[in-house]
Image (spheres, rainbow, N blue to C red):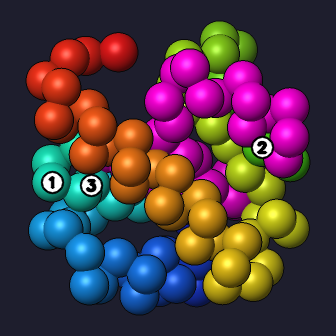
Amino acid sequence: MAYDVQLADRIRELLADGSPVTEQPMFGGLAFLVGGKLAVAASGKGGLLVRADPVRADELVATTTARPMEMKGRVVCGWLYVDGDSLRTKRQLSHWVAVGTAAAKDARASGRKR
């Protein structure tokens, strides 16, 4: 399945006024890199992949509809998957884009790989 083009357009709109953003095909979808670090991606399976501080990821999974991201049956630490039904409003999408952007900026500032 191809990524949701409308979702990608909505993400693009939210990121337009922030840090330098680049786009790159990745994970069968379209990834958005903020300052050179992957922040969010319109998934090829629908929904959104979100970079999250690994310390905060468990809290987000417990208190939202997000779930841990899996690739080839393995959980990817520091990454969440948010279903498209949880991204219908601008407010919902803005929240997740902010989570991903903050985690990307933190990764860049620290210089650490997680």
Give the image location of residue 66, x and y in percent: 77, 43
Looking at the rendered structure, the secondary structure element under dot 2 is loop
Which numbered disc, 3 or 2, marks the residue that appears first in the sequence? 3
33 relative position to 75: left or right: left
Quadrant in which residue 58 is drawn: top right
* Residue identifier under label 2: 66
- What amino acid type should be assigned to the residue bearing mark 1? Gly
Label 1 Cα neighbours within 10 Å, binned few <14 / some 14-19 / many ≥20: some
Give the image location of residue 96, x and y in percent: 59, 59
Which span is picked out in magenta?
Answer: 38-64
* Residue identifier under label 1: 35
* Residue identifier under label 3: 33
Residue 74's place in the image compared with 51, above or below, is above
* Dot 3 and dot 2 residues touching (CB under 8 Å): no
Q: CA distance from mark 3 to mark 2?
A: 20 Å
31 relative position to 109: left or right: right
- What amino acid type should be assigned to the residue bearing mark 2? Ala
Q: Nearer the viewer, mark 1 or mark 3?
A: 1
Q: CA distance from mark 2 to mark 1?
A: 24 Å
Looking at the rendered structure, the secondary structure element under dot 1 is loop
Quadrant in which residue 108 is drawn: top left
- Name the one closer to the observer, 84 or 14: 14
